[in-house]
Image: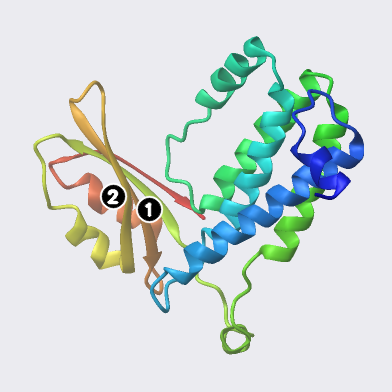
Amino acid sequence: MPEWMMNVNASEVDPTVTTLGMRLVLAWLCGMVVAWIARSRRPAGEPDTLSLTLILMSILIAMATQIIGDNIARAFSLVGALSIVRFRTAVPATRDVAFVLAAVVAGMAVGAGQYWVVGLGLSVVAVATFLNSSKPPSGKAESNKGEKKTKAWRLTLQVGLSATDGWESEISRFADSYELLSAETTRRGAAMEMLYRVTPSANSNAVEMIAALNGVPSVESVSAKMT
């Protein structure tokens, strides 16, 4: 077996820069293999939003493993740091979760004094992001050239827990399309909060839509933000 492969496979707590670089590149390649497998099982026509996340996660976990080494206290610290990463609203893309994890792992590396890990790790993450990001088909890009992009609204509704309908008919009056992104209970189970992505119709007004939704008896509060 080649000497460099033996070095990469060796369980060193503080490896050399060359060994660390080899490990991160191997993690990148392994992530690409996993992403290729995931793409091969994806139905035709479905957008590829997961491949980059899988690649970045592979690199980031390799960084985290190197940071922990054989330090049990540091391992528990990393678990605690990652457990605080929670999202009260829906994350638009899985890639964003990987970037949040990148920030956590990089901060842990700096705090542990492992500057080579964060330097080389983030360099590999950056290169992998630029080389593996999916691009829209050229035909689609040309067809959208010169067209004004329609901005979507992120609509948050809080309704009574027993309510089941009544607000979506009001949303459809002001939207060309809408999609429910998340739904969860709030106020200790006394109400339900729902998040929609709304594509407004021409000449729609967010203030008018909020006023109309407030008129629905089951709706307790409404907020809308541009995305």
| Residue 62 image position (x, y, % from top left) | 68, 38
63 or 99: nearer the viewer? 63
**Can you tell which mark lies on residue 186?**
none
As displayed, is residue 17 above or below residue 139? above
Residue in the foreground of this view, choosing between 22 and 85: 22
Q: Residues within 10 Å of mark 1 (few under 14, many from 20)?
A: few
Q: Where on the picture, by quarter, is residue 223?
A: top left
Q: Is residue 187 left or right of residue 97?
A: left
Tell me where residue 2 appears, x and y as whole percent: 85, 50
Using the image as rendered, state which of residue 38 and residue 109 is in the foreground: 38
Residue 207, numbered label: 1
Q: Is residue 121 visible?
A: no
- 179 and 209: which one is in front? 179
> Is residue 41 shown to the viewer in this render?
yes
Image quadrant assignment for residue 15? top right
According to the picture, the residue beneath numbered tag 2 turns out to be: 211
Q: Is residue 169 left or right of residue 52?
A: left
Side of 37 relative to 156 (left or right): right
Q: Residues within 10 Å of mark 2 (few under 14, many from 20)?
A: few
Do callouts 2 and 1 mark residues in contact (Cβ within 8 Å)? yes
Which residue is pictured at 42% across the width and 68% down the height? 41
Q: Residue furthest right?
A: 17
Query: Percent x, y for residue 212?
Result: 24, 53
The disc labelled 1 sits on which kind of residue? Val
